[in-house]
Image: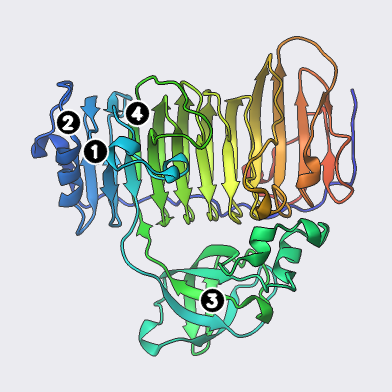
Amino acid sequence: MMILAVLAIGGVPDFSRAGCDELPRPRQVVSVLDFGAVADDETGDASAIQAAIDSVADSGGQVQIPAGRWVLDAPLRVSTSGVRICGDAGGGTVLHCPKPLAELRGPHRRWSWSGGMLELSPRGTETVLATVIADAADGATSLDVAWSDDHDRPRVGDWVQVRWYNDRDADTLLHWLYGGVIDPADYGSELQASQKPRVVSWAQVMSMDRGRVEIDPPLPAPIRSAWKVELLAKPHLLGCEVRGVTFDFPITQYPGHLKERGFNAIAGNGLVHCNLTDITINNADSGILLGKCGFTTLRDIAISGRKMHHPISLSWCSNCLVEDFSIEAPHVHGTTLSWSSHYNVFHRGSGQALAMDCHRACSFRNLHQDMVVDQGRKLQQPLRSGGAKGRGPHAARENVYWNIEFRFEGDGPPFQVSRLSQWPLGTFVGWHGNRDIDMSAARKDQTVTLINERPRPGPWASNSISGP
């Protein structure tokens, strides 16, 4: 068996903080039956289910949807914290969605990558709380700040966003994100010209003392004065949950890439410490689309049916956990990471020709661990990715792929993994299968080891940052 070790394995980022803590018991429980919803009658139930959701909006609570087939003739929305939508524990709650968002809300290109039949998104506007006025090291927890307004200071325990901006023309933040090993000519013209934040990360305020704030978790990137780092109050949803439901879409022909009409299941924006568990999705355009979320867990996710666009997508997300999932539907992008998503974990997942997609725009320090890629007859590259070319290489620094198993139909020559040049400072440990894996195209700055061997438990399972 071929074994390749470009570099000896070293430390990897600490991913131990990914995911949501256990949620407290709900304050109240209501049933959609009490609001007029009727299962299995082929009439629309969205208004009754939405009324049940709205009834617990002020103080939070659980909305119970019993077993049965419920027709979503309009999208549902959760816009306040503490709302929990729970179906039948035996898997019998089916939300049938006969029409796409293009019919329910009007045609728009964005349905290819956003929107869902269940949307969890807060209302309100963000506020700049402070500017960070002193440099800080990668992994620091103390920030020296200049407050924008005494009345807007956060309280201990509040969740805030930290935002980094690239210094245009010098591009030193992009230089850091690409690990100093990518030619500046390849940084991406869109990113270089952009005046928008380049990194967005959630953190909790642990203490404050005049011009100093202690946060947790540690910073995912260093702070330099040229990067104009800000502290923001950002509207978000805390402690929401969706559990035990099946999203069932009609069987339709896939309309083509970027022509999707919005047969999308769940869209979450600004979720912090939320849970999406025991979710089944059939025949969707996109499955679960998360944007600007943190410390949120997706667990026991099963996606099947016809070809789709994004099965699971994390955009601008930090410290989220996607665990125990299967993507059996053919797809353009599989486990999508985009727009500087970082410290996210995909664990114990499987998929038909699974695409582990870093969608350009500087996603860094994410972990895929214990994946099973069923290649079938048509061999596809596991690192195939998308995204506009003006957004730079497919990945930024220090993404980790640990214990990736490939299942091929029959014997054959070694399977050569391509696109490795797009993963600066990447770590690839224990890629193996029933056919040899060839990773000879690895970069010199990458860590590639134990190829064609099954490694010991990785950094997520052991909470260890040391390698084998």
Q: Earlier in the sequence, mark 4 or mark 2?
A: 2
Q: In the image, which is nearer the foreground, mark 1 or mark 3? A: 1
Q: Earlier in the sequence, mark 4 or mark 1?
A: 1
Q: Label for residue 230?
A: 3
Q: CA distance from mark 1 to mark 3?
A: 38 Å
Are discs 4 and 2 less than 8 Å apart at CB?
A: no
Amino acid carrying mark 3 in the image: Glu
Q: Label for residue 246?
A: 4
Q: CA distance from mark 4 to mark 2?
A: 16 Å
Q: Which of the two residues, 272 or 235, is positioned nearer the viewer here?
A: 235
Determine the image quadrant of residue 168.
bottom right
Amino acid carrying mark 1 in the image: Ala
Helix, strand or loop at label 4? It is strand
Name the spot of residue 116 as percent of width and height, x first: 36, 41
Name the spot of residue 236 as percent of width and height, x first: 38, 61
Q: CA distance from mark 2 to mark 1?
A: 8 Å
Mark 3: give few (<14), some (14-19) or many (20+) Cα within 10 Å.
many
Q: Residue at x 70, y 74 (%)?
A: 137
Look at mark 1 in the image and give the residue it sits on: 74
Helix, strand or loop at label 3? It is strand
Q: Earlier in the sequence, mark 3 or mark 4?
A: 3
Mark 4: give few (<14), some (14-19) or many (20+) Cα within 10 Å.
many
Q: In the image, which is nearer the foreground, mark 3 or mark 4? A: 3
Q: CA distance from mark 3 to mark 4?
A: 40 Å
Look at mark 2 in the image and give the residue it sits on: 44
Q: Earlier in the sequence, mark 2 or mark 1?
A: 2
Is residue 463 at least partly visible in the picture? yes
